[in-house]
Image: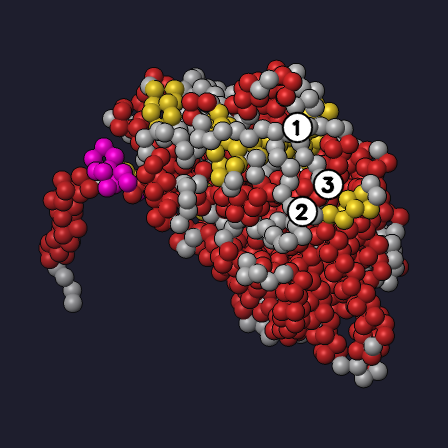
Amino acid sequence: MLVQALQALATGLLTGSVYALLGAGFSLIWGVAHVINIAHPALAVGAAYAVYALATRGVDPLASLATVVPLFFLLGVGFHEGVIRPAARRAGDLVLVSMVLTFGLAAALENALAAIWGPGPRVVNVAYTGQAIRLGVLALPVPHVAGAGLAAVTITALYLFLHRTFPGKAVRAVWQNRDGAALCAINLRQVTSLTYGLAVASAGVAGVALALIYSFSPATHLTWLVFVFLVVIVGGVGSLVGAVVAGMVVGAVTNLATLVIPFAWAPFLLFASLGILLLWRPTGLFRR
Amino acid sequence: MRLSRRQFLKTAALGAGALVVPQLLHRGAWAQARPVRLGGTLPLTGPFADTGVWVERGYRYWAERTNQQGGLLGRPVEVTILDDASSADRAVSLLERLITVDRVDLILGGYPGTAAAAQMALAERYRKVYISMGGHMASFRRGFKYSFGGPPLMGQWWYEGAWRWLANIPRGQRPTRAAAITVNNPVGMSVRESMLDGLKRLEIPLVMDELYDLPLASAEPLVSRARALGADMFLANGFFPDGVLTIRAMKALDYNPKVILQGVGSLIPEWVTQLGPDGDYVVSGTAIHHKLPFPGIAELNKAARERWNLKWAPQYFLFGYAWAQLLQQAVEGAKSLSHAVLVRYMRETTFKTIAGELRFDEKGLPAPYEYTTQVINGEVELIWPPGRRSAQPVYPKPPWRR
Amino acid sequence: MSRAAAAGLVAVLVVLPWAGAGEYPLALLYSTFMYATLAVAWNIIGGFAGYLSFGHAAFFGLGGYATGFLLVHAGLSPFLTAPVGGVVAAVFAALAGYPCLRLRGPYFAVVTMILGLAVRAVVLNLPWAGAAEGLWMTLPPWEPLAARRAFYYAMLGIALVTALAGRAVRLGKMGVGLEAIREDEDAAQSIGVPAVRLKMSALILSAGLTGLAGGIYAYDRSYIHPDFMFDLHLSVLAVLMALLGGRQSWAGPILGAVVVRLVDELLTVRVGTEAARIIFGLGLALVIVLLPDGLLPHLMRLRRRAPRPPAAVPAAVVRP
């Protein structure tokens, strides 16, 4: 029983770190630009397909990062400049408008992916799929470890960027106080574009990680959206540390819960815990 | 220019005549060429589209062949398939439109079970024959007169053949403990019924019986529990994505039961093309198969090869064709497009289709099928009944290939 | 639209089934009435109060399951028990809504989205509600055309009740209070607006009306399943319709619902579902960007040929 619990916990933490990565980018855009980017997971799915396309040509998913990261960064910047700025200029309620717009974008992306690859599920097979690292009684699947490793590296990089570099600090400044930052001669437009680029690039990395672990189809983004929301709500918008902790918690809870209650009730438990948490701390575990 | 009353009346009469007379003249030739219109909805986009597009191809291929062979009752057939975007709600409203506005002569069944079930209710209200996969057993217990599963996708029958095959294995070599995970939706639940029944008959204790919702986040906890409980038989009563996770988890945790039963995941082409050798030796059921010796199957396999570069006709391509073929046989046998006549005829006749012989009871169901499949070397083979075997079953499951 | 014109329109709608309309036009109008109900009801909490709910399908589905359950286990016709469906949804809104309403802005939106998904997950596991197999009900006893007429009238009635409720809220004291909450909740509270009570009332009313519609819808389908009774797309659609039509007025969402339903119908039939979705999405994006207040205020401005008000002034001041 204990072994199972440890196994469940271990796998949960690994997959949870990937949720954390996905949630981190989403949280970044929300915090800095006040935009709820419903299309965030859909972008990750897009990255997963890119990985698939390259994998069928013999490129290892980790190597495909070299293409995915810069491409998605540019995509993020383009998204901000081309879609969000025009909308923000004219919209009264940016939250609502951005949710609706990005929902439409996600749907469009889903349709585009279905048009190119068909609606069927895809699976990425690499040399280490199905292998596991043995840690005593535990077996850690190698793709999970790889995904978690990617998440860890990316989140650390993001953290260091935000706290150790000048542009990163500018991002945090805008996050904390938009007008104040502008008064300090920080170029809001550039900073916001940069944030978008980073967030979407992180979505790309998350897509690579997810492609290693799960099968996916164009419609998968909606299921990943739930995890993103959970992570951000529990961890608090704008907190990277919060996203990490929340991701781990969500991953661990979903896996551990199955030992105690029937598996089918796990989502309900998750939502109920979320409800209780919100009653206690409405802004999430880590206030921003 | 002002027309006198006479002139006006003359012109009007001429105009009206110009419109009507050609219709009258052509009525003879026109009526002969009037097509038989079949309509239905399928999920051509959305989560169920990967199956929906194959059912559509089955319908359309049937229409093409039928027209090449002289049509239905001497008239060409015309197929209209609307995209319900994987929404059961839309499936019903679109079907209502096809019935009341487009006035189609015959209905083609929808997919998946939830859409088919909802459409069954509508077809019953409008008194139209509805042939489809059905919406699991409950949908056939409603006392509907107009619905037929031809053949149905009946989870309750899914493992029937597998149990008979296992019963043939000497008692000492059979599995001793079973662990099961079931997806919490109509398909999974009905397959689970089949499982419970069979395990009881074979006297194999069920040590783990878990339900899960889609999407399955990770299969490791479930698999590790099955392993810890010493289960040497594993039943994954689910779909493709969860099946993939489950197989990979089993390999990663080095859990190798004697036999793995899979719900519906192993039937779609992707199981073999995407999962590779890891997907081998998984056992499942089916209602129709490309290696069955029934007339028509060889031709469908050929079409799959020529048009889509596939080795065999995919499952749902066969299903689509089968449902349309059944409708065709009913119409041609009864020599009528009247649904009341068709219903009576369908309950009195034994049909010979690509799915074998079908004889419907008062619920609209044929006799339970007992085909069992196993993926062997990347091919979905038939391993039961013995008379229809296309390969020898592999038991117990060999160790994972590394 | 003047009162006379509105009355005239309603009169036409009442007479229509007896003027020879076939099953499908009646079905189309029936679903338009339903969408209008959902949009107006949503707007009471989403538009007037500014609390964007992305989980309204939960209330819709609960109403449907309530009437379905009563039909299966007590043999009562949903035409009688639809109000019970509304009450069930309202009670749920009171219980679950209280913690949710403590959140604001995007948090509320996200939490209600999760709420919608949670309700689906729970019902999917309830054996006495059919669980994953869905709930089968007896078919309505009438011939298709007569049935269509019955459902048409039921949904027309519900839509009228909802419209009147929305209007009463908007033009009454509650509407003023909700508007104050939308503009600046803290300031409103500081001048004595009972924010919690008003928000809860708005949510409960909104949920109840939505559940009412769900209760009738279930009977028409005869077979209900959590996947389409608690569908996220339905929740988002309610938001979209209100957004499109104009959230500041009680009638704007009606216009939004009519446009959405008719455009969807035209596009699906003429162009195909996939293209329809793309066109619809683009059209919606255009409207959002070009007409942020929605269609109705824009149309009314055109009618009065008034200069466009500056963006800072809420269009709520204009009476619909």
Chain ID at mark 2: A
| Residues tagged by mark 1 and mark 2 found on one chain of the structure | no
**Side of B347 relative to A29 (left or right):** left
Q: Which residues are magenta?
A: B65-82
Q: Which residue is mark 1?
A: B233
Q: CA distance from mark 1 to mark 2?
A: 20 Å
Q: CA distance from mark 1 to mark 3?
A: 15 Å
Of the pair A86 and A194, the residue shown nearer to us: A194
Q: Residue A72: x percent and y percent?
A: 64, 68
Residue B132 placement: quadrant? top left
Label 1, residues with CA under 10 Å away: few <14, some 14-19, many ≥20: many
Mark 1: secondary structure: strand
Of the pair B250 and B354, the residue shown nearer to us: B250
Q: Which residue is mark 3?
A: B253
Q: CA distance from mark 3 to mark 2?
A: 9 Å
| Color style of the picture | secondary structure
Q: Which residue is mark 2?
A: A130
